[in-house]
């Protein structure tokens, strides 16, 4: 992008901002004030609160120095990662493992169907861990103290770090002895590029340099996506450069990528060891540089340091000034500030972590979970909120990915004897299923693409949307109808066995008709039929037959149950663990066959008796949606702010779950979906302002640009 165009764009954004401030006096939300009151800050190192910059395709996470200087202090909490949507690696498949080796046969209403459930077999272990997402490179300072020794984290004093959400810039200041250091870190909005500005007397004195280290890919489940113990398995070489730039070629088995480093001023770039390089200023007290991670050799570095900071600021201001906003500052409830903080930070985190061209992993682009692979049942919680908050394009980027794996999904359905497309659960950019004792039996990800497409159609109401996604919608519906088994003796269709519902505590061999999945099957098939009608096509007879005869939601003693095969949900404490997914039947989903009064009683019983320590981050938004829909907004707010171990939102906004899973973006995305629904409403909601918030006088909810939930 040329600097002139960037400046013009920046001026236009500034004009828009001025117009917004003028409009604020006429009752609009002051969006800059809203965002600025929630800038996270640090005055000491916090391994559970590193800050990140990113753009949905790439993210760079730093410690209190503004770079990744002290990774060992963060490894056991939130590692300092550099990750992208394209950065994947596989170790050699020396034994030529294939998915068939992980198959086991399961009786499916009298016929055997193979599922890749042998997770712990040699093939299962290799296929689960490959491919895995890469740590593309660590960038940190090497700082020398006055006595010549290398500075450690304890030597970093007078820390003052702020994540400027409005501009997408991390501003870091600290001292080493008597020397002050200031650092600014930003990410290019359209490229896998970080830009850094450093000011310090340590630079010209040759006591501070920037070190670039490169690891091998890790095949362990854990958070850190880097393997630093096998330097001979990969290569890092300078392939080009001059007095202002250097390009490094990285090769790890069949994986290859490039790192392009460009700087301003008099500096020297040199190799320290096989996978370590250093950039040192030769004079002066400032150093500016960009680092671009390139999937292919012929990609050019997009912009220099000043331009990258300009476009970062312009892009982020545009992000905040358009789409949705929720302002709770007028509320008297003391919890309002915390809820508003979680909303603002969740919007930032999901924009940099979840708005890419493929669905995100549960820990986004910060650290690894499940080898960096993404879970399609979680995609709803990561990304549905983008449409509700007026950013439909951020969901649409990853919805298009389903088109690329449609042939593989059709093949998987056919292999198991079904029509249509069966979407994988734990997968990678190529759409390959990963062996699992649980994942391969989950089915609640199957209707998701229909939901996404319907949201986009509701937002745009254009035939072009119907035409673009018709194949995804219809292939998904074909599987839904084919998977449902018709029992002629009872004249009804049933789901399972084998299956494991969203509440993952049930055995696949014996579970049938879970409440949430039954509701989602109805929603998917009804919506697909509406798409046929909108396109001028006749209704599909088979889909109508399934809809007319699909099993009813399981009820016992006046309460909905987890599944038809789990009728003692509220008598057996062991069944009230994990996700309370049965509530999603009338909350997350607009199930017109659910009885609101039964669901209201079920919600009350869940709130009184569930094992909250076993729940997960997206469960609280799930509860809030149901509470709003059944007329209990008090419970909706209480659920979003419930004091439980996995509903903790850290200083940086991340939803902490456990030591092994310190980041959980489904909790952030779910919070945003629930808040949008509570403010803007849902189909059939009461015609009152913010119907999902209490009307006790303690909540003043101002919102703009939100869309209601179906």
Image (cartoon, rainbow, N blue to C red):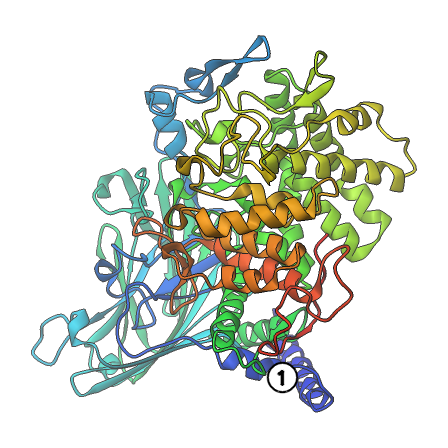
- Visible residue check, residue 470: no
How far from the left and from the top, in percent, is residue 142?
22, 69
How far from the left and from the top, in percent, is residue 319?
61, 70
- Taking the view exactly as shown, the residue that stands out farthest to the left is 147
Please state if 344 lies on the left or on the right of 226 as rendered.
right
Q: How many marks?
A: 1
Q: Examine the rendered structure and indicate whether residue 665 appears above or below residue 694.
A: above
Which residue was labeled with disc 1?
30
* Residue under the image location 52 percent in, 59 percent down: 350
Q: Residues within 10 Å of mark 1 (few under 14, many from 20)?
A: some
How far from the left and from the top, in percent, is residue 47?
28, 64
Q: Examine the rendered structure and indicate whether residue 623 appears above or below residue 252.
A: below
- Which quadrant holds residue 522? top right
Please state if 186 lies on the left or on the right of 556 as rendered.
left
- Which quadrant holds residue 581? top right
Q: Nearer the viewer, residue 594 or 265?
A: 594
How far from the left and from the top, in percent, is residue 690?
68, 69
């Amino acid at each position: 992008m040329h600097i002139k165009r960037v400046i013009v764009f920046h001026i236009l954004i500034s004009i828009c901002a001025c117009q917004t401030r003028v409009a604020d006096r006429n009752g609009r939300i002051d969006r800059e004030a809203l965002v600025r009151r929630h800038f996270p800050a640090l005055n000491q190192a916090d391994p559970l609160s590193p800050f990140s910059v990113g753009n949905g395709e790439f993210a760079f996470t730093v410690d209190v120095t503004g770079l990744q200087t002290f990774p060992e202090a963060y490894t056991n909490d939130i590692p300092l990662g550099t990750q992208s949507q394209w950065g994947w690696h596989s170790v050699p498949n020396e034994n030529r493992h294939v998915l068939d080796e992980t198959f086991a046969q399961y009786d499916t209403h009298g016929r055997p169907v193979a599922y890749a459930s042998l997770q712990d077999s040699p093939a299962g272990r290799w296929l689960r861990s490959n491919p895995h997402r890469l740590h593309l490179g660590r960038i940190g300072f090497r700082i020398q103290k006055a006595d010549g020794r290398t500075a450690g984290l304890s030597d970093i004093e007078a820390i003052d770090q702020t994540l400027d959400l409005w501009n997408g810039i991390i501003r870091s200041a600290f001292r080493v002895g008597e020397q002050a250091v200031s650092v600014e870190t930003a990410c290019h909005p359209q490229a896998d590029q970080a830009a850094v500005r450093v000011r310090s007397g340590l630079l010209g004195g040759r006591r501070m340099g920037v070190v670039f280290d490169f690891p091998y890919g890790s095949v362990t489940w854990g958070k850190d996506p880097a393997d630093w113990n096998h330097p001979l398995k990969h290569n890092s070489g300078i392939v080009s450069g001059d007095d202002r730039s250097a390009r490094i070629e990285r090769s790890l088995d069949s994986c290859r990528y490039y790192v392009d480093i460009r700087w301003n001023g008099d500096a020297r770039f040199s190799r320290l060891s096989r996978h370590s390089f250093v950039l040192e200023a030769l004079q002066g007290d400032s150093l500016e540089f960009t680092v671009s991670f390139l999937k292919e050799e012929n990609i050019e570095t997009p912009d220099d340091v000043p331009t990258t900071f300009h476009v970062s600021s312009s892009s982020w201001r545009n992000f905040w000034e358009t789409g949705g906003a929720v302002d709770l500052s007028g509320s008297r409830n003391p919890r309002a500030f915390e809820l508003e903080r979680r909303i603002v930070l969740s919007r930032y985190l999901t924009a940099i972590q979840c708005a890419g061209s493929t669905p995100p992993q549960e820990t986004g682009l910060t650290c690894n979970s499940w080898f960096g692979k993404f879970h399609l049942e979680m995609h709803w919680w990561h990304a549905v909120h983008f449409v509700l908050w007026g950013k439909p394009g951020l969901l649409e980027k990853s919805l298009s990915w389903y088109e690329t794996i449609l042939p593989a999904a059709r093949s998987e359905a056919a292999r198991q004897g079904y029509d249509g497309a069966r979407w994988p659960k734990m997968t990678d950019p190529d759409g390959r299923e990963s062996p699992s004792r649980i994942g391969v039996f989950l089915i609640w990800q199957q209707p998701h693409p229909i939901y996404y497409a319907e949201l986009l159609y509701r937002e745009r109401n254009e035939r072009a949307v119907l035409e673009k996604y018709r194949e995804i919608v219809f292939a998904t519906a074909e599987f839904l109808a084919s998977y449902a088994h018709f029992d002629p003796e009872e004249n009804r269709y049933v789901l399972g066995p084998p299956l494991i519902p969203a509440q993952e505590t049930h055995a696949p061999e014996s579970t049938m008709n879970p409440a949430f999945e039954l509701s989602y099957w109805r929603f998917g098939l009804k919506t697909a039929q509406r798409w046929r009608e909108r396109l001028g096509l006749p209704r599909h007879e088979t889909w109508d037959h399934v809809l007319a005869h699909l099993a009813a939601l399981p009820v016992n003693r006046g309460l909905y149950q987890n599944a038809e095969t789990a009728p003692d949900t509220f008598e057996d404490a062991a069944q009230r663990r994990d996700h309370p997914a049965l509530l999603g039947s009338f909350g997350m989903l607009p199930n017109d066959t659910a009885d609101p009064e039964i669901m209201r009683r079920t919600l009350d019983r869940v709130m009184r008796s569930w094992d909250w320590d076993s729940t997960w981050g997206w469960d609280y938004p799930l509860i809030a949606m149901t509470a709003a829909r059944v007329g209990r907004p008090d419970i909706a707010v209480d659920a979003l702010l419930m004091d439980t171990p996995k509903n903790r939102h850290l200083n940086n906004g991340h939803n902490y779950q456990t030591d092994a899973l310190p980041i959980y973006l489904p909790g952030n995305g779910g919070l945003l979906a629930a808040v949008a629904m509570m403010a803007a409403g849902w189909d059939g909601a009461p015609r009152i302002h913010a119907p999902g918030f209490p009307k006790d006088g303690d909540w003043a909810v101002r919102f703009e640009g939100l869309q209601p939930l179906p």
